[in-house]
Image (cartoon, grey):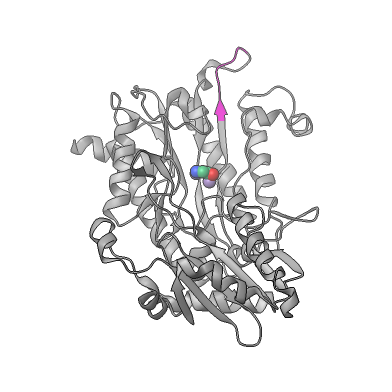
Amino acid sequence: MNIEAYTRRRAELARRMGTGVAVIATAPERARNRDTHYPYRHDSYFYYLTGFTEPEAVLVLVAGENPKSLLFCRNKDIEREIWDGYRYGPDAARAAFCFDEAYPIAQLDERLTDLIANQPTLFYAMGADADWDAHMMAALNRVRAQVRAGVHAPGEIRDIYAMLDDMRLIKDSHEVEVMRRAAAISCAAHARAMRATRPGRHEYEIEAELLHEFRRAGSQFPAYGSIVASGPNACVLHYVSNDRRMADGDLLLIDAGCELDGYASDITRTFPVNGVFSGAQRDIYQLVLDAQSAAMTRLVPGASFIDYHDAAVEVLARGMVELGLLPGTYEQVMENESYKRFYMHRTGHWLGMDVHDAGEYKRAANWRKLEDGMVLTVEPGCYVRPAEDVPQAFWNIGVRIEDDVVVRAGGNEILTAAAPKSIADIETLMAGALEAA
Ligand code: GLY
Ligand code: MN
Ligand code: MN
């Protein structure tokens, strides 16, 4: 593990805080049903600063001239480790993760009182979790109860997420390296899904191919619920049932990406179940691909976040008019926003530890400017539900094409370029798979 990346981030956070104390907890474990828990996933902010993945852990960062980091975590417990597996315990965790001090989580409340006493500012995730809000207020009140002993309590409480969101928005080299590997696994999974797709198979059989490829390559989880949407389901934006039998002539839209070592990938590919695009499918697919290409050209440092969405919309709206999906002229379609009937979502989002990653999109009223090291998705689409005023050839065609991009001053890096995308590449790959079957 690259411990230096985490100590560097803690030092940077302390620098931005100036003075005061930050308290950042990891995620709680959650019961699914009796005696069964949801698979445990650490909190992204906590992980960003620690690399530590055990539950029941809290980071306390004391800023100032000599910043220090303290970890509170579960004790070693041989009895529990027989049932649940290895846990570091404070001593080993301190050494392995380079904290200045580490203590059992049971000592958090008692030590927190001393740690925040006489500090000007308490930073924590305000309002993110009601229990944690109460916990922090109780700690504050314990300090206030000591005023007669000459202790003063922090006069200011600040939200730590705002500061961390800003840091998380620009990925460091360690993060980009992990995201590159996550993306490579997801690209292989999408290619595998294309090879496995045939009329008559079920969506969930293809989902299983994706999950197999994720896991065999070491990914811990899917980064979000995989969407494997064939035929009319491709027009359901958050389709998750994945249980339909695919028919000859359908398109299959797959939006799936793995999470690797805490980082997400997010890819969508759309392809014909029988391996060959029909005329109408080809028209819509090429339109979305052209929209994506146009959007990509706007991803340069200094551009506003919304520019690439505007570029995609321009191409899509023109295409919708040309194909006869929408009445009127391009100018009218832009004016009355009728393109939103077939393209109703934004063209992308920040990507990182969370699939919809941390970071502001607007500052005051202004869209953020892109900077070197930001990572975002580029995912235009076109979704045509059956309707009397729409040419029947286009009914139930839903297409989205999504890639993950690192914005670079010297030229962007497309993390997901290896997932087949052009009509020719997709048809060639699928023809090969059918021949080999
Ligand atoms: N897979 C979620 C998204 O594309 O935003
Ligand atoms: Mn996305
Ligand atoms: Mn997606």
Q: Is residue 145 left or right of residue 377?
A: right
The residue drawn where x is 37% and y is 31% is 276
Q: Quadrant of the N terminus?
A: bottom left
The residue drawn where x is 55% and y is 21% is 385
Q: Which residues are magenta?
A: 383-388
Q: Main secondary structure of the magenta part?
A: loop
Image: 131 above or below 67: above
Residue 16, position as x, y percentages in the image: 67, 75
Q: Which of 297 and 224 lies nearest the eye of the viewer?
A: 224
The answer to whether residue 178 is magenta is no
Q: Which of 28 and 279 lies nearest the eye of the viewer?
A: 28
Residue 326, position as x, y percentages in the image: 67, 24
Residue lying furthest front? 148
Residue lying furthest bottom? 65
Image: 317 above or below 2: above
Residue 382, position as x, y percentages in the image: 57, 33
Residue 338, position as x, y percentages in the image: 71, 28
Q: Which of 355 and 229 lies nearest the eye of the viewer?
A: 355
Q: Is residue 252 visible?
A: yes
Which of the 4 image quarters holds residue 192? top left
Q: Quadrant of the C terminus?
A: top left
Which of the 4 image quarters holds residue 388? top right
